[in-house]
Image (cartoon, rainbow, N blue to C red):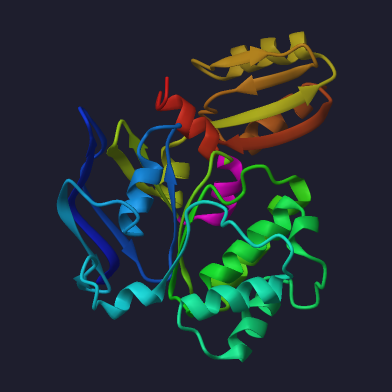
Amino acid sequence: MNPVIQTKQLSKKFKHDYGLQPTDFNLYEGEICAIIGRNGAGKSTLFKLIANQIHPTSGSIKLFGEDGYNINNQGRKRVGFMIETPEFISNFTAYQNLHYFSIQRGVTNSEKLEEVLTLVGLKNITKKVKQYSLGMKQRLGIALALLTGPDILVLDEPINGLDAQGIKSFRDLILKLNEENGITILISSHILNELQQLAYRFVFIENGEIIEDISKEQMLSKGKRQLIIKVDKPESAVRILEEHIENINYKVLHNKEIVIEPPNIESSDINKLLLNNNIEVEEFKIETTNLEDYFLNKGVGN
């Protein structure tokens, strides 16, 4: 599969330090790819280089197989960017703002304005932007990025500052754009549990360098798996587990929960063992490593 965005030894040096080390990165059609790293790791530098907002120190970028820095590359029109929340005209409505920016971007089809506003759920909103919540402004930012009908959206920290409902609405929108409209998504965020629900692939960056590129399936298979059981008699349960399971690794919590990590026999056998020994199992669940755990266990940003 040919990448829709491809960088070759792309780098950016600010005075004496690299914001981005020479980097090879590919983004493939149809995926949702998350770039993950602490503040200053190089995420925004990579995004701004892709958006041509800053010039590289070295290396190259291709958009749809063509030189990304060629001003005649029509592929650039196929990429929509929201690197930072755009500055909108506060006394304008959503439609008036999009109309203003559409003139600048050469979009002459007025139906396109209605289309993208419908897509982000702002079509019938008549109040002015100064009355918008942050979530509504983020939606308008995505509408602006969609104006040229892009095949790719590049979104840098788009959910920062949103409340729980705003984050859920944003997630639903991104999944819809990807699944129903076929838009490829490149996204970053510090809200890692949210990224886990969105992305199929995670790229970890530290000190301007990509240190790991992993699929969601690979991450989950590499991560820890633990069994958590809540029982009525934890002391008796632990004694039974030690007698029947060799080299068991566990810890007992204050709320009568026993955490077994990793379980080296089938979880159903553990449940059966306890029940057969008159231990009442009040709760029984299996947890696997999530993206935040994986990130922290890597020591990234420490």
From this view, report whether residue 250 is shown above or below residue 68. Answer: above
| Magenta region, residue range | 192-200
Task: Assign the N terminus to one quadrant of the image.
Answer: bottom left
Point out residue 8 in the picture as x, y percentages from the top left corner: 17, 55
Q: Residue at x 36, y 52 (%)?
A: 48
Q: Residue 220: where, in percent of width, then height?
A: 47, 43
Depth check, front residue: 261 or 146: 146
Q: Quadrant of residue 240?
A: top right
Query: Residue at horizontal 41%, vertical 38%?
Result: 222
Q: Quadrant of residue 102?
A: bottom right
Q: Nearer the viewer, residue 231 or 269?
A: 231
Confirm whether residue 224 shows in the render. Answer: no
Q: Does the magenta run of residues contain 196? A: yes
Residue 45 in sight: yes
Image: 222 above or below 127: above
Counting from the top left corner in percent of width and height, residue 49 is at 30, 53
Quadrant where the C terminus sits is top left
Magenta segment, prevailing SS (helix, strand or loop): helix
Residue in view at x 82 percent, y 67 percent: 127
- Residue in the picture at 54% in, 16% down: 249
At which x and y percent is residue 152? 43, 69
- Which quadrant of the structure image shows residue 124? bottom right
